Amino acid sequence: MKAAPWTINNKLFANKIASLGVAVIPPTYGGITRQNAFFAPTHGKITAIPREPQDLIFPLSFLISGISAFIAISQIEPEFRSLHLISEILLGRILVTNVGLFGVIAFLLHYFRGDTTAKDLGWPTRSPFQKETAFADLAMGILGILCLFMTGAFWIATVIFASFYFSGAVITHLIELISKRNLAPLNSGFLLIYEFLLPVMLVALLILSR
């Protein structure tokens, strides 16, 4: 399968990809879209599907949490810094940003852009479950944001909720990825990595902060 004639800024990277026999597919090319690209006849070659700009939200959210925690930690006298305190500060930032704001954004996407989100997941459209999922996301988002004002056992409950939520999402995406070769943008890539790393980080930081 020939690589699509679209502009790739890093030509060295493009040549390397071509030498590996990787077919690069633009948003829409020859009747192939991001959502059905994994059905394309690649003759055994790997198919690299460009990611949407929205994928940057996931690594950026970790960056924001990290910078916010760094600023807070830098204001503490060195002799008072400890693994316990640093873990607690970072956990608080992640709960608010990566759980709270993520939940609110996910609610907006599932509720107001349900069909578009379903397509990006490689799932059927026009399903009322989009709205049901939206309110589960909103509940998680509210819990995360409330971590700004509540600590202690409330943080533990939020970590438990978010960890099971994201772990379940990872399992679901992996089943779709393996059994159906679902390489839709929101079923793989950054989101899958994000949903895998977040529960691990939440549980680890919670243990370290106790």
Image (cartoon, rainbow, N blue to C red):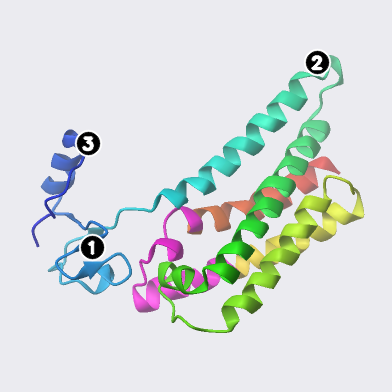
Q: CA distance from mark 2 to mark 1?
A: 54 Å
Q: Position of residue 133 (x, y in %)?
A: 63, 74
Identity of the amino acid at label 1? Thr
Secondary structure type for disc 3:
loop
Of residue 129 and residue 17, the one placed in the foreground of this image is 129
Q: Position of residue 162 (x, y in %)?
A: 71, 61
Give the mark toward the camera: 1 or 3: 1
Disc 3 target residue: 9
Q: Is residue 176 magenta?
A: yes
User: Which sits earlier in the primary sequence, circle 2 or circle 1?
Assistant: 1
Q: Which residues are magenta?
A: 169-191
Return the mark for residue 166: none
Identity of the amino acid at label 3? Asn
User: Which sits earlier in the primary sequence, circle 1 or circle 3?
Assistant: 3
In screen coordinates, is 41 left or right of 33?
Answer: left
Q: CA distance from mark 1 to mark 3?
A: 18 Å
Identity of the amino acid at label 2? Pro
Disc 2 target residue: 78
Disc 1 target residue: 28
Q: Quadrant of the N terminus?
A: bottom left
Q: Position of residue 111 (x, y in %)?
A: 60, 71
Q: Quadrant of the C terminus?
A: top right
Q: Is residue 145 magenta?
A: no
